[in-house]
Image (cartoon, grey):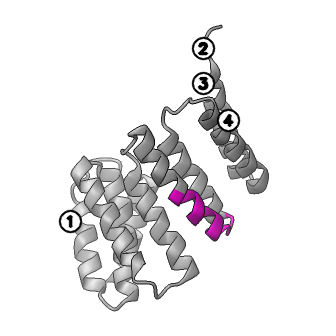
């Protein structure tokens, strides 16, 4: 009656995320996926691409790499269907991370990171650009080109004027230190 299906579904999804972060990743992931599917079934599509990236990330953290990769393919199709393009750069970044775990020599890894980077730049999504660039920098370093990766990462990191204590910027600084 009050049209609360979407907020309730979001609440269940986020509760699953918290459960996972508090030490029960399997139970949390199951709740996140059930909530995601329920939102899909009931045509509550607001923020599904974003929520899907959280679910895919959780699957990766649990070591369910192939499951995450299959889910990312589904999520990309859903993003087109729902016209939710904002988090598509993260879909590509997470796909690159998944591929890297399955086959570190795959040429698709760098291509996915570069696609993520390009889309984030086109959207002006600086935080997503930083994540994509950090992944690309690691990929380039693994392939013997740490200099290019570091240069790309410095250029993105230096555009941030605040928030230097956030996890992504702290990780970027640590990566730059490691790359020399």
Whether residue 68 appears in magenta in the rendering, the answer is yes
Question: On the image, numbered disc 4 is attached to which residue?
Answer: 38
Q: Is residue 7 above or below residue 108?
A: above
The answer to whether residue 34 is seen in the rendering is yes
Q: Residues within 10 Å of mark 3 (few under 14, many from 20)?
A: few
Label pair 4/1, CB-CB below 8 angstroms: no
- Check disc 1 and report its element: helix, strand or loop: helix
Looking at the image, is 119 positioned above or below residue 19? below
Q: Are marks 4 and 2 in contact (CB under 8 Å)?
A: no
In this rendering, which labeled residue sits more in front, label 3 or label 4? 4
Alpha carbon separation for disc pair 2 and 1: 45 Å
- Please identify the dominant SS of the magenta region: helix
Mark 2 vs 1, N-terminal side: 2
Q: Which x, y percent locates residue 28?
A: 73, 48
Q: CA separation, marks 1 and 3?
A: 38 Å
Residue 12: assigned label: none
SS under mark 2: loop
Residue with the mark numbered 1: 155
What is the x, y in percent for residue 23? 75, 54
In 3D space, how far apart are the residues under numbered discs 4 and 2 (Cα atoms)?
Answer: 15 Å
| Residue drawn at 46 percent across, 56 percent down | 167
Residue range in magenta is 62-73
> Depth-wise, is mark 2 or mark 1 nearer the camera?
2
Q: Which quarter of the image is occupied by the C terminus?
A: bottom left
Which mark, by number, is residue 3? Answer: 2
Q: Secondary structure at mark 4?
A: helix
Q: Position of residue 10 (x, y in %)?
A: 61, 32
> Marks 4 and 1, how far apart in space?
41 Å
Rendered residue at 24%/71% (across/down): 152
In the displayed structure image, the side of residue 110 where residue 97 appears, left or right: right
């Amino acid at each position: 009656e009050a049209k609360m299906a979407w907020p309730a579904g979001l609440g269940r999804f986020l509760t699953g995320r918290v459960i996972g972060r508090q030490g029960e990743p399997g139970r949390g992931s199951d709740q996140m996926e059930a909530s995601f599917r329920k939102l899909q079934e009931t045509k509550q599509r607001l923020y599904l691409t974003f929520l899907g990236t959280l679910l895919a990330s959780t699957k990766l953290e649990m070591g369910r790499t192939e499951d995450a990769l299959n889910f990312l393919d589904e999520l990309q199709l859903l993003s087109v269907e729902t016209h939710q393009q904002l988090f598509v750069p993260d879909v590509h970044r997470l796909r690159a991370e998944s591929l890297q775990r399955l086959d570190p020599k795959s040429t698709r890894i760098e291509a996915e990171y570069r696609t993520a980077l390009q889309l984030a730049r086109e959207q002006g999504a600086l935080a997503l650009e930083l994540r994509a660039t950090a992944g690309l920098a690691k990929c380039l370093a693994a392939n013997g080109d740490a200099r290019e990766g570091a240069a790309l990462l410095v250029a993105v990191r230096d555009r941030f004027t605040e928030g230097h204590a956030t996890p992504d910027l702290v990780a970027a600084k640590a990566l730059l230190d490691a790359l020399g």
